[in-house]
Amino acid sequence: MKYNINILFFTLAFLLSCSGDELVMNDVLKDQKIEAAYTPEAYQLNIPKWLPEMEIPADNPLTKAGVELGRHLFYDPILSLDSTISCASCHLPELSFADPNRLGVGIGGAIGDRHAMSLVNVGFYTKGLFWDGRVKTLEEQALMPIEDHREMNENWKQVEKKLARHPNYPKMFREAFGIEYPSQITKELATKAIAQFERTLISGESRFDKIVFANDLDAGFLTDSEERGRVLYFFEESQVLEHPGCSHCHNGPLFTDNAFRNNGIESVNSLKDFPDKGFGGFTKQLGDNGKFRVPTLRNIELTAPYMHDGRFQTLEEVLDHYSSGGHFAENLDANILPFTLSARDKQDLINFLKMLTDTNFVNNPDLQNPFK
Amino acid sequence: MKKFTILTIILLAFIGIASSCEKNTDDNETGTLSLQFQLTYGGEPLHMFERFNYASGASVFIDRFNLFISDVKLVNSTTKQSIKDVAWLDFSGIQDKTTAKTGVRLEIPKVPVGQYSALEIGLGVSPELNATTPSNYSASHPLANNYWEQWNSYISMVIEGKADLTGGTTHNLILTYHVGTNDAYSRINLEDNFLIKSGKNNVILLEIDLKKILTKEGQHLDIERFPRDHSTRPEVFDFLRLNLPSAVVLKNK
């Protein structure tokens, strides 16, 4: 028995020293001065004038090389443990960077507990990211999927090493951030680059934008059905109590007020019983349980399934939910009220929502996978 | 080219000196003022979801209270000092007794020190700012949200909650009152001696009494007949907007 343990010990020691040596050798070999120029050029964001200004952190100004590096990292499965999953596995460009799966599917098919929302206009959200608002900045957010065991399940030390040994990344990091040695590649720089790329995910050229904001005559006019949908969406008839009231929450040029609200999708006996506490899980205030961030409705035609848990497959189902008035709870938002929705109203509202689809955005070559 | 560089350096140096001077005077001659707003019902601190007895006999709680204030000035015999263009007071995070006592704190830096005799507050969004739209602002600015397209106006006050008309514990009547448009704007002038000193310890305590918004001189808003209004019915809109100015007072005055 003693003998066996000894063998085990020696084998282990041998194995450990081997892999250790290999890493050290690799590090020594690759950490030579990077041969590339550092001439950062500012990246000009192209923000239509009807969208708000974007607030960009002073310590992470956008540069052309930074955005390009960020795009590569976003699409590169090198960030995951077994090189199978990239950010784009759950945030698909052709779907406005949302996920067709109901819940996030990460490494080895591990299932998360929320639906990956669209990243459209994500650079404009200042009141907290994720469905529950628990993260403040894109830089901070980008750290998380890498180490989440149900997403990419890798650790950053390892990612830093993989990037440093890579044939192209050291050069790209130098061009973006002026580092001199591959060993200076850090998770902070990687996430800064990803955040820079994410800030370029700007959509404001849907048919709605062209007609309503840009007064672009080439875009034509609203069809009768779209116009009826628009009125249902934005207006309240003065003396009628019931109305869809969508724009109480999905309002402004971003089609969200960025607030946290309970839109009544969950049936619970008390505020303590929400299966996903959402905003309340973050604020630790009972009254915030079951509230989620109001998501944008831009490109909504492309981003099914819907809600934080992807429970609805179609916009028809979403509208049926709203017209029912939702499930009552003490904190059910006061703007969620039952309303009658004729088949025609439904179609009109959906036709209106489809006006928010921006094909220029989803087809924008600058946002596509650079490895294809 | 060389000439240009030298000029630039001189210019930059000058700007540097000028701005550092400004900083010095700033520290000595301005202070930070906190306007601390407490939401009350009949003078008692009120938090979200807290039940209160309404004049009609109903039991009511609110779960959202927002108010825009704009064009805030400190006044004395020689100047009217603008100190804040616009701010959005959001009480939805106030959900317990402790935070209800503190209320919502609005920090205003760089207020010139001195003795003032009145605080002027615009309740709602001033017509000048109300002519703008969310597109004019950066994403975290209060005027980047809270806009109602149908009125071409910001929503200056939001009162949302639920009621049990019988006074019981089943609060299933939803109440929503959204007040906006230029007609919803009013100004109040709160007189007192305000001494603003350098540093951060200048605090003015204010109170917003919801009871004074919903009731007046024996009359109260008929929440049964009008559980919801969007600045359309004069019985509701006028009642709320005209009551608001007397509901905002200096605390303990």
Image: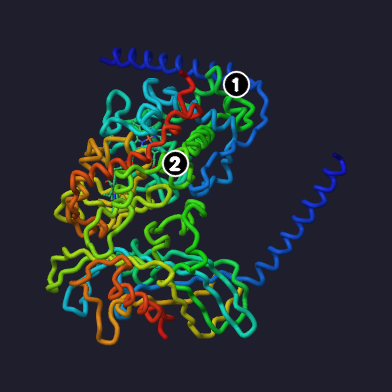
Mark 2 vs mark 1, foreground winner is 2
x, y percentage for residue A149? 33, 31
Judging by the rendered image, the residue that carries numbered circle 1 is A31
The quadrant in which the N terminus of chain A is found is: top left
> Are there few (<14), some (14-19), or many (20+) residues within 10 Å of tag 1?
some
Label 2 to label 1: alpha-carbon separation: 38 Å
Q: Chain of mark 1?
A: A
Q: Nearer the viewer, residue A254 or A32?
A: A254
Q: If you read the primary sequence from the N terminus, does the residue marked by circle 2 or circle 1 appear first? A: 1
Can you say whether A246 is above or below B249 in the image? above
**Which quarter of the picture shows residue A283?**
bottom left
The amino acid type of the residue labelled 1 equals Asp
Dot 2: element: loop
- Which residue shows up at 49% across the image and 62% down it? B131
x, y percentage for residue A180? 64, 27
> Are there few (<14), some (14-19), or many (20+) residues within 10 Å of tag 2?
many
Can residue B28 be seen here? yes
x, y percentage for residue B174? 21, 63
Q: Chain of mark 2?
A: A
Judging by the rendered image, the residue that carries numbered circle 2 is A121
Disc 2 and disc 1 in contact, CB within 8 angstroms:
no
- Which residue shows up at 24% across the image and 45% down it? A276
x, y percentage for residue A225? 29, 44
In the visual, does B106 lie left or right of A281?
Answer: right
